[in-house]
Structures are given as C-alpha cells and as structure tokens.
Amino acid sequence: MNKPVAASLIAITLLGGGCATSETTPAEPTLETVSVATAVTTAKIVSPSQNLEVALTTDSGTLAWEAKWRGETIVQPSALGLVFKTGRDFNRDLVIASTAQSNKDEVWEQPWGERQFVRDHHNEILVDLAFTDGSPAFSIRLRVFDDGLGFRYEVPDTGPRQITDELTEFRVDEKAQSWWIPAAGWNRYEELYETTPLSEVHRAHTPITLELPDSGPFLSIHEAALVDYAGMWLNQGRPGALEADLAPWSDGTKVKVDGAFVTPWRTVQVSDTAAGLANSDLILNLNEPNALGDVSWAKPSKYIGIWWCMHIQECTWGSGEKHGATTSRTRDYIDFAAKHGFDGVLVEGWNYGWDGDWFSNGEIFSFTQAYEDFDLEGLAAYAAEQDVYLIGHHETSGAITNYEEQMEDAYALYERLGIPAIKTGYVADGGEISRRDDDGKTYKEWHDGQYAVNHHLRALKLAAKYKIAINAHEPIKDTGLRRTYPNAFSREGARGQEYNAWGVPPNDPAHTTILPFTRMLSGPMDFTPGIFDLSFGKPVMEDPRVQTTLAKQLALYVLLHSPIQMAADLPRNYEARPDAFEFIKQVPVDWSESIMLDGYPGDFAVMARKDRNSQAWFLGAVTDEEARTIQVDLSFLDSFAYEAQIYRDGEGADWRTNPYPLEIDFQSVGKESTLTLELAAGGGVAIAFIPPE
Ligand code: NOJ
Ligand code: CA
C-alpha cells in the first residue's frame, strides 16, 4: 500500500547552496551514469508521527547518517560504506544521484507469535549513490518507523567479490548505559549480560541495549533479515563509535557475494521507555512476508523431555547403564505428557555418536540410526496412539558438513514418523564450526559467519519441505526470519536454564530481568523454564542451583516467549508440586497480543499476553535480587469480569534461603482494577485471567 508522500517528508539540499523540497523523485534505482551537477548532499526522512528523523549526507564524498528523536540527536554522524578485496570500494567520492520516497501503513498477520496482527507503518527513502565521475555505485534503502529505523545497502551486480569491511557505524553518547554481551568469544551468545557505560563496551553482539544519559530514550541496535551475509558484531572504535565488525570466514574475508546483493537491515529501535523497546515489531516488519505458504503444520506446542536428567548428571546422553534415551523411560515420559496435556516429548541422546567426549564427535554423529535400547519407530507409534509426538534432536557438535550430508534423510525419517519439530544443536566453541570443503580439508568458521548463516537457512528450507519446525541451540542469532520462514520456531542464542544445572556460574537473579530488554528483542527463546526442584535434591543453599523462587519459574512462561515451550524439570518434581504445575499446564504458547507493561533491565519486568485461542489473559512479572512491590493497572484487559488466579511468592519466600513458598489466590478483577503485586527477593508472579465461561 504505497501512498503519496507529504511534501515535508524529504528536504533536499542542492549542491551550490540552493534549497529545494522534492515531492516525488524517480522510483527506479538509477544505475546508469548520472549528472553529478544535479547531485544533492543531504536526504532526510521522518517517521509517520515525526518523532524520529534520519538524515543521510555525502559531505566531501563520504557517506554518513545521523538520527534525531524528538529533535535531539541520538545517533551522531556515523560512517557508511563497504570495502572490497578487489574493485572499487564504496567509501569515497560518493554523491547522491537520486532519491525516491514511499510509505506504507498496513497490517499483516502472523501464523503464530507474540501477537496475531502486526502494523507496519513507515516512511521510506531509497537513495541512489554514484561516484563523482558519474558512474553508479549502490543504494541505501532507509525506513523510518515511530519506533525505530532500518537501512540496508542495495548493491548492483559487479560479479563475484569479497567484502573485507563494512564501515557502518552507530555513534552514540559514550556515557549511555549499556546492556551487552561480548562477541567473538568461545561461549557464543551464552554470556551473562554486562551493565556498563557504553565507553566500557569492547566488542558486543547485537541486539545491544542503550539508555542515553539524562533519562534519554532507550535504543536497541541490531539487524534484520540476516541472509547470505555475515552476522554483525559491534566493535567500539573511538569512544562512542560502535563499528560494524562482520564475523569473518576462516580465510579472513567477511562476505562472499556474486552478483547483485542486499545487506541485512541495520536497525535501531527507539523508545522513551525500556518497555517500549519490548513492544516494537520493527525487526519483523523489516523481514519479507511468509515464503512457505500454508504453515498450519508448524504448530506451537508445549513439551517435556529427556533432557534435565543429563544436565544434572542423573543420566547420560551416551549409551550404557545411565543412558537417558531408553525405550522404557521414553514410554514413561510419553505417558506423563499424555496425562498432563503436553504435545511433545524431546529425547536427547537417542542416536549414535554420543559415546565418549561428544563435544568432539561431530564427524561421527548419525542422525538416522538409533541406539539399540531406543526403539524409535515403536516409540513414535506409541506416542501417536496417545496424541503426543516425539520431538527430534540433532546435536551436530558444530560439524555442519557431517550434518548436511545426512540432513535430508534425517528430515524424511522424522516426517515419516510424525515428528514435527527438531531441536538442533551446534555445541562447539565460537569460531570452531567445522566446514569440510570439496578438497577434503576441514576449515573452522564462526557460528555467526556467512557459512553458518547460510547453513541455518538451508536447514530451515529443507525442514519446511518435510513440514518440520526448527528450534536451534548454539544458533545464529534471530533477525526476524521467522516471518519469512515460520518454521523457524525458536532458538537458544543466550544463556538458558542449563547453566543453573552446571553452575559455571548459574544465572544470577537479574538475568531474566535483562533478557526481555536485550536478547528477547530479537525473537523467541527456548530458555526452558519450569525447574521446580531448585537445587536438584541437595539442600537449597548448596550450589549449583537455580537462583529464583518457585513462583518466578512460573512467571518465565509468560515473560519469555517461545512457540515451543518446555516444562524442563523431571516428571517426579512436577508430581510433587501439583499446585504450581497447574499453571504450566494451563499457560498458552501462542498469543494474540503481548504488552510489556513495565520494567527496567536488571531490575524487573512485567509482561501481559492474551491467549491466541481464548479470551484469557496471562501476566508474568519478575524481579532481580531485590524484593519489590509492583502496581499493575489492568486496563489492558477486555470487558469481562475475570477470575484472576494469582501464583505468587508466599510468606517468607526468598530465592536464597526459602524459595518454595507459593500462594495461589483467586480474585475477581476487571479492566478498571489495579493489582498490587509483592515479589520476593529473586521472585516473581504468574497470573491467569480467566473470563466467565
Ligand atoms: C546444549 C544445549 O543447549 C542443550 O539444551 C543440549 O542438551 C546439549 N547441548 C546437548 O545437545
Ligand atoms: Ca547451549
């Protein structure tokens, strides 16, 4: 839906000092030689409500961008450009050859997700750049929304080339408070967040969240639609200058292109509040629509799994006496799933390759051959009889070539057995993904380099052919591709529950108050909440353990969205707490609306979501190590008299000394009500708002 653009949308300064306002400019990118005499040096565009303004400039032939929020500079003039191994670089002698504007205001529907209907409302400018000698260079497509901006490079065909550097910068006040994790390290994205002034950031992953000084707006810098390109790290050069630093190939180049290409969108989400960032749909809006057609087979689901028992070392992935993936244990899990209404049962360690040090077994994993004590076919049939399915597991230990050689057979097998989702895994240190080349040699690549990026998309497309959804661990970060490929269900890509079992160190009580304002801005996460035995049979004060109250485990089901959501603990621990388990059984995994009501990274978060399949609303609130009282205005509810079923920290609850007290209160509420929620230290609250039948 392209509408004519208001004349005020773009102001163009003519070379030679003249000033003009342009209403319409040619829509087609201009790739033939242009007359530089008519070139302009600034192109500006504002968001629909005019709160955000972005300008591109070509002073002295170098390209830069800057952004203002409510008239105040939030991104200072920042470089743009690409440098290639061969041929002409896009870093100097540039002029604006032409501009074209358009806008959009449309609503599109998600097959599943955090909300059903998403509004895409933005103004766009396409800026064609040429060299001063008149030869064409490339274009920048820039979209400005009321909640942020995105731009990408669009480059015409100049044959096979290698990008050695992307010059994009984000220059922000170095005093900004930042929530970030280091990039280019061995632990991929699985770090505890750092909370520091921007000046202390060295090399960071995206999304990175910033709060500008003096209660300035919050920014989240990230990327959207990462396709056939390298993932972007941010390296701080001069203080405050975050420079794009693309994850390199093993040969040192950054991106290999052949023909015309577009880069991922470079994005900045902007909001006056931290909660506002979490309510933005900008990343999805910058992705292409569903390319898979009917995806009704990609069904959101709740699952249990033979999983936690390996992490707390009660059983093993490898074969032998303690083998977790046995036929009899899996039957028990299927029975438990059927009894309590779970859709799926994940089984890890079912396939050949786990014996010995499985971290190093990447080249020997089989993805089709089960261990002898695991009757794959029989169990798939047994599950189907009970209206449950198995969830597949493919741990690659980062050996992508070995996986790709078997991928199609493995997906076909799973489809035949009615297995609709696979958890994949790429456990290998950062920079240690194995790529076996045609020459038989093995090369080591990054988890977020172009090779891995392309592998993940190949896996998604092939899985779609077999009607299978993917939940990737040690993945490439989420950049919103689930819009285009809705079988991209969920992923890890952050520090999940498993660290609480290993205790290296466990996730501190603030961790899940930071995730909603950082990692979760990129998309769903398979955090695997729901641990009820918080210290795994040991006294509660002994490490390692989960550093939350029981109520906070429940709150995570609402707070941390995933269309495939796990009840991670052992069945016996759920049987011991039927009161708390009731909430996990009840909580939906697919939503028609989601609203982050309040929060601040590192302190607390309050999320409300409406069930996609009923009129019920749910709320999850968590706090860090501080006890906290939160007032919640319930005006988000619809016009019903609801029964609020409140699962809250009980008398004396404290994550460290006394995590288990749980009170379940029932209260009549409506949209005019306000709830006062008392959260214990390291605690939380989970609420189901049930409308009348
Ligand atoms: C790491 C994953 O995050 C975890 O969930 C899984 O159990 C192991 N790898 C084994 O694949
Ligand atoms: Ca992991």
Image (cartoon, rainbow, N blue to C red):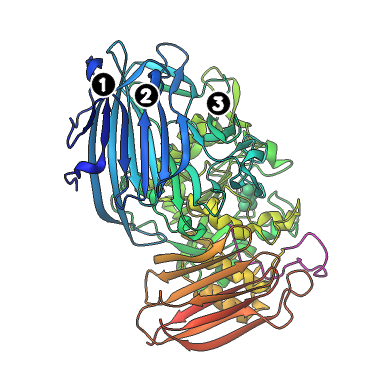
Foreground: disc 3 or disc 2: 2
Q: Residue 667's x, y, as percent?
A: 51, 88
Which image quadrant is residue 328 in? bottom right
Q: Is residue 529 magenta?
A: yes
Are the residues flagged by discs 2 and 1 in contact, CB closer than 8 Å?
A: yes
Q: Residue at x 64, y 46 (%)?
A: 190
* Label 1: element kind: loop
Q: Residue at x 51, y 52 (%)?
A: 216
> Range of the magenta residues?
527-546
CA distance for labels 2 and 1: 10 Å
Q: Amino acid at mark 2?
A: Thr
The residue at which mark 1 appears reads as 39
Mark 3 residue element? loop
- Residue 58, percent from left and from top: 37, 24
Q: Earlier in the sequence, mark 1 or mark 3?
A: 1
Alpha-carbon span between mark 3 and mark 2: 28 Å
Secondary structure of the residue carrying tag 2 is: loop
321, 154: nearer the viewer: 154
Q: Amino acid at mark 3?
A: Pro
Residue in the picture at 19% in, 42% down: 7
Look at the image and tell me whether residue 467 can be seen.
Answer: no
How packed is label 2: few (under 14 Cα within 10 Å), some, or many (20 or more)?
A: many
CA separation in Å, label 1 and label 3: 35 Å
Q: Callout 3: 10 Å neighbours few (<14), some, many (20+)?
A: many
Tell me residue 1's x, y (percent). 19, 48
Which residue is the site of mark 2? 58
Predominant SS of the magenta segment: loop
Q: Is 209 placed above or below 660 here?
A: above
Find out whether residue 534 is within the magenta segment: yes
Residue 248, numbered circle: 3
